Amino acid sequence: MPWRSFCFGIISLMLTTAVVMVLSGHVQADDVVAEEGPRLTVKKCADFKVNGTGDSSAWQKTEWVALNRRPNGEHEYTARFKMLYSGKGVYVLFDGTDTRLTATMQEDFLDLWTEDVFECFFWTSEDHPVYFEYEISPLGYELPILVPNLDGRFLGWRPWNYEGTKKIQKKVSATGGANESMSAVTGWRAEVFIPYELLKPLRNVPPESGTQWRANFYRVDYDNKTTSAWDWARVGPSFHEFKNFGTLVFE
């Protein structure tokens, strides 16, 4: 048998074996390596007060990062974010076009993801399947939770003594209309400061120059009884597929 034919035969056998193992369940989903996700360098800044408009000069240090509309999304809206970090915490600025603020909830810690919302997830240490999730509505209500994710089983835990230096600073604003429930608008923004004091249970906090976190950023919109969603790092059906998150590199 010619050497080239022999090599092709071996490669074919290996590929066939691998396919059979996957189809028969002998290779777990966790064993399949996902494609490398996006990377973002997070610049350092001095602390500033958030106001919901993103007009602080600090934001001029970094560029907007686009979120990508997920499959089956119908709304032709844009979605993007910026991120900075300081010695005390991380800053995130969300921005998106819109036509209506589909948001009715009037309290924090509700199921905000069932209405218009921006979200960010921070997985600070790959040694542990625990990450921080934050959601904010167009009306300024929030959902900050810590999420243990064990073999695809996850549950969010609310922060304890959520006040003082642990409290997240957050503001929202709308353009083209009132910042009110079901208001017609042309877009909305959310600006948040998440203090390290709140993230203390997690490892790799606070970040230093060269520190890397895994992360993802999302938007969900429910206008006209139709749902559209956006992500930074592409995930499957669940936003909690943390192994597919992108990577933040702190400058």
Image (cartoon, grey):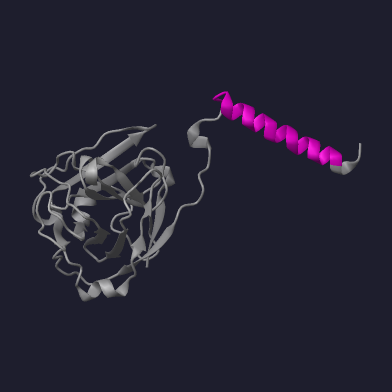
64 to 143, vertically: above or below? below
**Is 6 colored magenta in this rendering?**
yes
Left or right: where 217 falls relative to 50: right
Say left or right for 96 vs 128.
left
Residue 128, placed above or below residue 233: above
* Quadrant of the rendered image containing residue 157: top left
Give the position of the C terminus as an image quadrant: bottom left
Can you say whether 129 is above or below 121 in the image? above
Task: Identify the image quadrant of residue 206.
Answer: bottom left
The image position of residue 155, as x and y in percent, is 26, 34
The secondary structure making up most of the magenta span is helix
For residue 51, say whether it is visible: yes
- What residue is shown at x 23% (from left), y 44% (from top)? 224
Q: Residue at x 74, y 38 (%)?
A: 11
Residue at 15% in and 46% down: 103
Is residue 119 on the magenta stretch? Answer: no
| Residue 137: x %, y % from top left | 17, 50
Res 124 visible: no
What x and y, as percent, mark residue 184? Answer: 15, 55
Where is 85 relative to 102, above or below?
A: below
- Looking at the rendering, the stretch of residues picked out in magenta corresponds to 5-26
The N terminus sits in image quarter: top right
In this view, the residue in front, 143 or 161, is: 143
The spot of residue 148 in percent (x, y) is: 30, 37
For image coordinates 36% across by 38% down, the residue present is: 238
